[in-house]
Image (tube, rainbow, N blue to C red):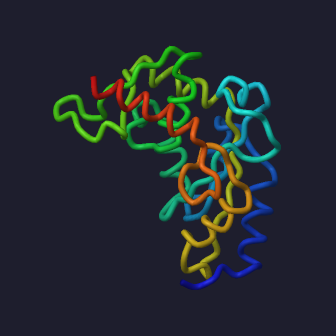
């Protein structure tokens, strides 16, 4: 497997650890190209999530085609919890504070309960919490980066965001357990 160029990793880390914008302002700042994004929240939001605060992002992800469609068109839109790992993780941690109830992603053909969704009113509460608390930083990948996933893995290993369960050295057992509770709730 090829290595990540040090310059690309440094550039990504610098961008993802730099200036952030509120989600409401993101459409004016997020480029419509592939890249990585990091989500930040104030200390109080970390407390609501039940995780210990530390200086760094809550979550880092990649958009293979477009940061606009992946971030702004999936993660921050009501009704998209079943399609967003980020939304499912936040929902699992905010289940009690926001009184969220998990349902199957597809009510007509219930299956794959780990990809649970939320009732519309609960999905809306989650979206409102996200818009009120989250800020985004992005790194638009240069055309010279052939494997975005390798850069993402290197960034995850370095930053260890607590809401990422994959490709981090120490994934949160608490988050995994909270997501399992929501998946079980969707199944019943």
Number of numbered discs on residues? 0
The residue that appears at 51% across and 41% down in the rendered structure is: 75
Residue 133 against residue 111 in the figure, above or below: above
In the foreground, 90 or 114 = 114
The residue that appears at 48% across and 63% down in the rendered structure is: 65
> Where on the picture, by quarter, is residue 31?
bottom right
Position of residue 173 measured from the top left corner of the image (x, y, whole percent): 57, 41
Residue 37 against residue 145 in the figure, above or below: above
Position of residue 101 measured from the top left corner of the image (x, y, whole percent): 41, 19
Residue found at the very far left of the displayed protein? 108
Q: Quadrant of the N terminus?
A: bottom right
Position of residue 119 measured from the top left corner of the image (x, y, whole percent): 37, 21
In the foreground, 125 or 179 = 179
The residue that appears at 39% across and 43% down in the rendered structure is: 83
Position of residue 140 measured from the top left corner of the image (x, y, whole percent): 64, 65
Q: Quadrant of the C terminus?
A: top left
């Amino acid at each position: 497997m090829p290595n990540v160029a040090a310059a690309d990793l440094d550039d990504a880390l610098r961008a993802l650890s730099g200036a952030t914008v509120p989600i409401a302002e993101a459409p004016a700042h997020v480029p419509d190209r592939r890249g990585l994004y990091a989500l930040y929240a104030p200390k109080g939001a970390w407390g609501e999530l039940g995780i210990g605060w530390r200086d760094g992002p809550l979550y880092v992800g990649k958009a293979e085609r477009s940061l606009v469609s992946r971030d702004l068109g999936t993660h921050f839109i009501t009704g998209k919890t079943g399609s967003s790992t980020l939304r499912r993780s936040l929902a699992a941690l905010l289940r009690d504070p926001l009184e969220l109830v998990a349902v199957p992603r597809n009510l007509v053909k219930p299956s794959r309960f780990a990809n649970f969704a939320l009732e519309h009113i609960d999905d809306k509460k989650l979206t409102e919490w996200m818009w009120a608390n989250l800020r985004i930083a992005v790194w638009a990948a240069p055309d010279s980066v052939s494997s975005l996933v390798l850069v993402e893995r290197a960034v995850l290993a370095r930053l260890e965001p607590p809401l990422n369960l994959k490709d981090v050295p120490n994934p949160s057992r608490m988050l995994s357990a909270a997501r399992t509770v929501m998946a079980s709730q969707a199944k019943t």
